[in-house]
Structure formats: C-alpha cells, structure tokens
Image (spheres, grey):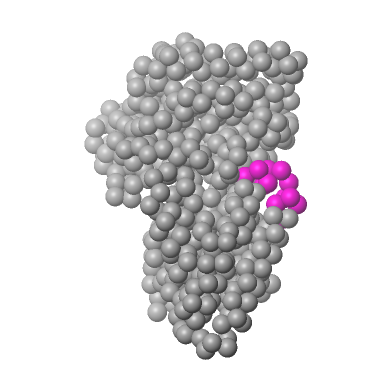
Amino acid sequence: MAFMLHGLAVSGGIAIGHAYLVSHATLEVAHYTLPPRRVDDEVGRLGKAFDTVRGELSELRSGLFADGPDARSELLAFVDLHSMILDDPMLLDEAGEYIRSRRCNAEWAIKVQMDRLVEQFEEIDDAYLRSRSADVVQVVERVLKALAGKSRRLSARRRDTDSIIVAHDLSPADTIQFKAQRIAAFVTDLGGATSHTAIVARSLAIPALVGAHHARTLIRDEDLLIVDGTRGVLIVNPDQQLLDEYRLRAREIEIERSKLRHLTRTESTTLDGESVQLFANIELPQDVEQVKEVDADGIGLFRTEFLFLNRDLLPDEDEQFEAYRSVVQAMKGKPVTLRTLDIGADKALRGAERSEANPALGLRAIRYCLAEPRMFVTQLRAILRAAHYGKVRILLPMVAFQHEIESALAMIALAKQQLRDANRKFDERVEIGAMVEIPAAAMALGTLTNQFDFLSIGTNDLIQYTLAIDRADEAVAHLYDPLHPAVLRLVQQVIAQGKRAGMPVAVCGEMAGEPQFARLLLGMGLRQFSMHPSQLLEVKREVLRCDCGDIAPRVQKLLRSDDPVRIREQLDRINAGSAVQP
C-alpha cells in the first residue's frame, strides 16, 4: 500500500531505491524463558555479540585514520566513547547477571539493562551527562543487531546506488561508514538542517529528508521509496504511474544539472554588465573539493564550529591551524572567510551544555567566545597563522554592542601579539568582518561600518530574531518567512548603508542560495552571495539572466509594500521577467 510522509528537505534531488533500515534499540524485543541448561550458553552468546560490536567499532576507528586528520578530529571521540560504554561492567556484567537470575534471553536482558541506565542518566541534573543516554542507546542497538546476526555495517549486497538509509536517527559513528558507500539518500525521524546526517548528505550531494517523525516505524526493509529532497516528500511503495513520473523528473533534474555544469567557468556577470561574486559556505575542510568543482570565487563562510562539535576534547591550536591551512592552500589565493565559533543555541560543546530558558537569546556566538577567552584566543591564533598561506578574512558572529566589538578586536590584537612573541608567521593585515544577524545591528549599522572591513548578512538568524520565531521549533516553523516586509527592509537597509560607507556586503544565509531570491537581492544592490556549493550554479544562472537596471526600480517598488501576498506576486513577476507592472 502506497503512502506519503513529509519532512524537512536538507539536500535536494530525487532518489528512487529500496529501504535499508537502521534499527533503533527502543523497538520491542522478544522475551522468553530459558531452560536452566541453556543459561550459560546465553551468557556466552551475549559476550560474543559484544565482541562483534568491538570489532565493528575497531574497524570504524581504523577507517577514520585512513580518512585523514579532518575525519579523525570530528568523529574519533564518538567511536572511543561508544567503546568505553561497551566495556563498562554495568552493561555486560549486569545483563549477564540478569540472564542468570531470570533465565531470560540475551536480547531482553540487554534491553532491560539499557532502560535502567537511560532512566538513571535522565535523572542527572548535569545536561552533558544526561545527554550521554543517547550514546548508551546507540551502543545497545549495535549489540541487539549483533545478537540478531545483523551487522551495522552495510553488507555487500547493499553497497549499491539504490540503497536508501532509513533510521530513527544516525550517530556520527554510523555516518562514517556511509561516506565510503554508494548511498542513494538518507531519511531520518529526527534531525534538522545542521544535523550530522544533513551535513553528510550535502557533502555527498545526495537527497536527504530529516524530521520525518515515524518513518522508521512505518517503513519496512526493502520497501520501494521515492525521496524528494527538494519538496520534503517521502513516498513509500509508489504505484507504477507515480514511479514513472518521478523517474522522468529525476532524469530531468540530472539533465538540468548537466547543463548547469557548463556554467562552471562562465564569468558571473549580469546582462547589463554588473559583476557578481559567488562564494561558497562550508562546514568541514573536506567540503573544499565541492567548492573547487563549481569554481566559486572563494569561501564566504567557513563554519568553524563544526570542527569543535561531536567530540569530548576541544581541538588545540595546531589541529585547528592544520585544518584551516588545508582549506586556504586548496583555494590557491581565493579568499577564505573563517567565522569564529558560533556555539550556543542548537550547537553546544560537549560538557558545556547550559540550561537556558531561551538558548537562542542566551550565551552564544561572540558572547560565548568572549566568556571563554582562552578558547577564543587559541582559535584566533590558529586562523592568523593559516592566513600566512593565503587570503584569509575573520568573521565575527552575532555582534551588536560596542563593548563586544572592542573586546573582540582586543582579543585579535592579543592573539597577534602572542604570535609575535612566539616568532610565529602570520598575516598582520587580515581583514575583520561582522555578521549582521540581529535587528539591532542592522538598525544601528554605524557601530559596525566604523570598525570593520566588511559585513555579511546572516539571514537565517536575522529572520528568526526579527519575527521572534525559533526556527528549530516545528510549531512555529511555518511562520519563518524571508519575504516578510520587515525582513526585506532590514536586508535592504544593510546593503544600502554598506554601499554608502564603501564597505563590501555579502549575504551568507539560506536566502543567498535560493534561486527565487537572486533577482530580489540583486535589485537591492547585493553583489556578493555566499551559499552551499551545490546551490551556486543555479544562482549563477539567475545572475546571468538578470538585468539589474531593469529590475532595481521594480524591487524598490516591491519593498514599499506591507502586504506579504502582494510582495510574493510582485516577486513572481520579477522572476518571470514580465514587463507587466503591478
């Protein structure tokens, strides 16, 4: 029977293939009583399952070292943590004792012990320790799979291009192995746009759907699936007509992508001769290969916090330096803009989780960095050292107050002095920029234009704060609107004031990567866009088709409207190239 599910589209395209289910340990397991003579054998069976999982984790660990230091730094800590949990006597020994005392099967014993541990973790006040319950669940899931004779690694028969991973959630340890496999798509019940699954899917350029809620429980292994990573739709067991329709659409998308690749070396210039710079956003050093494939003008946003997440120990100065330098050298003189740590809200360091009534309005981004000066200066030293090998710019997130600016600039000066004292090579003339993400910063822009070299508008947070909407909250996500009149006027104001001040302004939020917004932003006067590499060629096509002189007055008229419906209608006409005036 065919049915449809909806989720959050985090990586575009269409995939058609068969479901490969990654089980979740909270599923029901069988419970039966053993005869006394089989108890010892059952304890031994549990021990063998633990040995199997140790082998899997050891293989994953070896794979990390083969992948190089970037993969190691991000994910090695997870493998080691899961190994520690597996070796904890409270798991194996207690489950073994439960088998002996209750004469129950190994699956039930390990499930009962998992429930006990999770319950204990959830009663802990410390947020970091409490969050470790998820790791216990993931480890026990591996043991249950081993008991069932089903390894968590993909079998040879599943290493084909039509395997679609379906899971309740995916841990970083799981996604390591998928990087080496030919996977068609990802579907998970949980997750958001910045989840590890989403990052891996984008880096692999395959469709992905997260936040699909009950997909894992409703889908069966080998079900035929259609994943529409553009519209956020998952179709299970489609009929032949629907299947043919999506196969045709998939071919059309591939033909379109092939045509777009011809634009790679084309200069990004509008019909009336306006030069437009198209930069790329990256999360990890290995993403630079995609940047080079689309011949971006540089990296407009390197989200450096992803080097810090999913690990127990922070990267030291040398580890960060090597990661940053590898990107800078790979770009061969093109600019690389490194955003300093944007930690907080939905991105927390291990062991530094805080209980806040509203994390989005709490200690995050530049506020967090200033509260942790040693960590901040360490990162700044690493960035400055990497700048010796190419053109590097430093971007400070979420600045709004004069005292924040002064403190951040003082930290940069301190990092420079420490490098001089240590006789380290670095670039003294690194440009410093600020992200405009808070309405207060956009409305009092003089505070920024007087002290920085460039500006970058982070539309994701600017929209969130302007409209008072937590974009991670599904209950209000539908109100998240880039075309709200207040949002458009703030973006326009920043672009215009930056131009008057002679300061370069870029947009690096999701708006920059949406082709439907390209002409709107060009009409506002924007000449620097930064987006995920997979979006760049589509935006370039819109730039090549645009006549800025023609659309600028029409965009200005659109900006005077207070009616969101009318704004959308006017934008549709602008995008259609219609000469009909509203």
- In the displayed image of the protein, which residue is found farthest to the left? 563
131 vs 149, left or right, is left
Locate the C terminus by quadrant.
Answer: top left
Locate residue 412: give its quadrant.
top right
Locate the N terminus by quadrant.
Answer: bottom left
Against 483, residue 434 (above or below) is above
Locate residue 411: give its quadrant.
top right
Q: Is residue 74 magenta?
A: yes
Stretch of the chain drawn in magenta: 63-75
Against 488, residue 405 (above or below) is above
Is residue 229 visible to us here? Answer: no
Percent across and percent down for residue 439 are 35, 25
Q: Nearer the viewer, residue 444 or 351?
A: 351
Give the residue drawn at x 59%, y 74%. 46
Percent across and percent down for residue 210 are 45, 56
Against 516, residue 45 (above or below) is below
Q: Is residue 351 magenta?
A: no
Give the residue drawn at x 40%, y 21%. 400
Q: Nearer the viewer, residue 89 or 265?
A: 89
Give the residue drawn at x 49%, y 49%. 195
240 vs 533, left or right, is left
Q: Nearer the viewer, residue 553 or 478?
A: 478
Q: Nearer the viewer, residue 446 or 196?
A: 196
Percent across and percent down for residue 105 are 51, 80
Is residue 473 visible to us here? Answer: yes
Percent across and percent down for residue 241 are 45, 75
